[in-house]
Image (tube, rainbow, N blue to C red):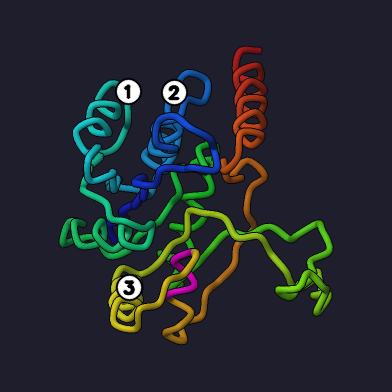
Amino acid sequence: MRIAAIVPAAGRGERLGPGAPKALRLLGGVPLLVHAVRALSSARLVDVVVVAAPPDGVAEVRAVLDTHEIPAEVRVVTGGATRQDSVRLALEALPADVAAVLVHDAARPLAPSDLADDIANALLAGAAAVIPAMPVADTIKRVDESGYVVQTLPRQELYAVQTPQGFARSVLTEAHDAAVIDGFAGTDDASLVERLGVKVAVLPGYDDAFKVTRPSDLVHAEAVLRRRVERRDR
């Protein structure tokens, strides 16, 4: 079973502040996107990576990727106005023989290759949908529009979801088609699949698979990357 990885990278990343599109912001002198694509392409079970670039930035993204050594085949396609649109367009561009798909955020540049292989192995074992997640450490409360607590949620049932998320290709395609028909917008691909009644398996996530959303996240990522380099050079 051939496995592809999709990386939606068409967003601007406005919460990260002014500058280049988020996927092209530098981490250790290398764009976030390159870190993410390298990790995916270094996974043993990923055969091809498809990057969905901004409509006006396909050539730029292709040029950036071409200047870095990446082990697997990488294709660049035109993304959409939203993350969900970009994933759907990348799905349509996959090689015909791809049977399973990983979807990974470029904004999680330090997610290790082992995580991609964990998800891919679960798909090979028969899972239709699988996601990595970490138990939340904070108390989570629902708050109404007036700023008052409505409910304290049971923390032992709550998990923070990461990427890459993995799916049988047919399941993910059906989920995106249904979302288009219904006008549904989800915050991740698993939420689209859940609407079909498909069971989504959960695997342990990784500390380093955090999302770079704000400037402080980028500072944290720089620190993690430095520690990795120091360990490697010892």
Q: Which residues are magenta?
A: 188-192
Q: Nearer the viewer, mark 1 or mark 2?
A: 2
Q: Nearer the viewer, residue 226 or 147?
A: 147
Q: Is residue 131 above or below residue 17?
A: below
> Residue 170 appears at what percent x and percent y?
29, 74
Distance between the Cα atoms at labels 1 and 3? 32 Å
The C terminus lies in which quarter of the figure? top right
Q: Is residue 151 above or below residue 23?
A: below
Name the amino acid type tagged 1. Answer: His
Q: Are marks 3 and 2 in contact (CB under 8 Å)?
A: no
* Residue appearing at x 76%, y 73% in the figure: 146
* Residue appearing at x 45%, y 33% in the figure: 32
Distance between the Cα atoms at labels 3 and 2? 32 Å
- Left or right: 229 in relation to 56: right
Q: Helix, strand, or loop for circle 2?
A: strand
| Residue farthest to the top, as pictured | 234
What residue does disc 1 label? 68
Q: Earlier in the sequence, mark 1 or mark 2?
A: 2
Q: Earlier in the sequence, mark 1 or mark 3?
A: 1
> Residue 5 appears at what percent x and percent y?
35, 51
Residue 176 tag number = 3
Name the amino acid type tagged 3. Answer: His
* Residue appearing at x 28%, y 44% in the figure: 54
Name the amino acid type tagged 2. Answer: Val
Q: Main secondary structure of the magenta part?
A: helix
Distance between the Cα atoms at labels 1 and 2? 9 Å
Q: Nearer the viewer, residue 94 or 215?
A: 215
Q: Helix, strand, or loop for circle 3?
A: helix
What residue does disc 2 label? 30
Q: Are marks 1 and 2 in contact (CB under 8 Å)?
A: yes
Image quadrant where residue 231 sits:
top right
